[in-house]
Amino acid sequence: MKRSTVLACIGVVIAFLIVGAFGNKKDFYEKQENFKTPEEAIVNFIGYANISETIKAENGYYEKISRQFLESISRRYRLYIGDDRWSSINYQIPQFSSYDLKEITENDLDFVKNDYEYSLEQIPNYIKPIDKRFYSLNGNGSNMKYNDDRHPNEDGTFDNEFDIEEDKMTLYLVVIDEGEGYVVDYYYVNNVVEG
């Protein structure tokens, strides 16, 4: 075989490898909004967790996670839910009509701390956050879901316009600072408020 033919074959193989490496990147959401306080991130998180956006496609319409919700979650959480798992995960988060938010220590609830630490181990090479804050949100909520024609109140709550039966619920949250403002990195829902 001629030397020029071998070099051409090697060039084609290298070109395919480069195209394959760059063409296989996943479309990843880039944050646009920075929350200066953990409370701002939590308000956005609970307000937009169950609101979806209707997207028009070639063969009809489909529901997609709200861009507003993506602003309040960590890079790790965005990677975890991806494009196809968001609905089953986010529908666990209740919509609150009222709540009380308080910061707690990570030792107040060992099971939340342990579950959170375990979730961090599930992603290899993930750098564990240093600035972690734990919150407890106790309130009245329901699992009613809305599409993009509803918007939350300024505090992330929703008016109970349809007189839906609400339950006492607790939402435990771990909020971190990723350098682009505060974001929610983990949550745990307890449908019965203790005490």
Image: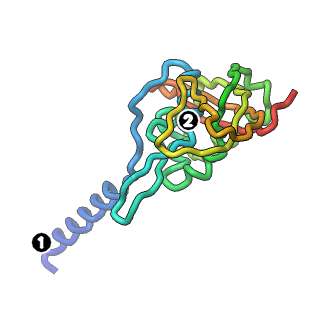
Q: CA distance from mark 2 to mark 1?
A: 47 Å
The quadrant the N terminus occupies is bottom left
Tell me what residue is drawn at x 38 percent, y 49 percent: 27
Q: Provide residue 179's location: percent of width, then percent of height.
A: 47, 25
Residue position marked by numbered label 1 in the rendering: 4
Q: Which residue is painted at 61% across and 52% down in the image?
A: 88
Is residue 105 in sight in this rendering? yes
Q: Is residue 17 above or below residue 139?
A: below
Query: What is the x, y in percent for residue 35?
Result: 48, 23
- Front residue of this view, candidates 156 and 135: 156
Label whose residue precedes the other's in the sequence (2 or 1): 1
Q: How is the image coloured?
A: rainbow
Q: For the residue labelled by badge 2, is the local secondary structure a helix, a strand or a loop?
A: loop
Q: Residue furthest front?
A: 162
Q: Amino acid at mark 1?
A: Ser
Q: Is residue 113 visible?
A: no
Task: Give residue 127's mark.
Answer: 2
Label 2: few (<14), some (14–19) or many (≥20) C-alpha neighbours in 10 Å: few
**Amino acid residing under circle 2:** Ile
> In the figure, 74 relative to 180: above or below?
below
Percent of width and height locating residue 44? 53, 30
Disc number placed over residue 162 in the picture, else none: none
Which residue appears farthest toward the bottom when viewing the image? 1
Residue 95 lies in quadrant? top right
The percent coordinates of residue 28 (x first, y second) are: 41, 45
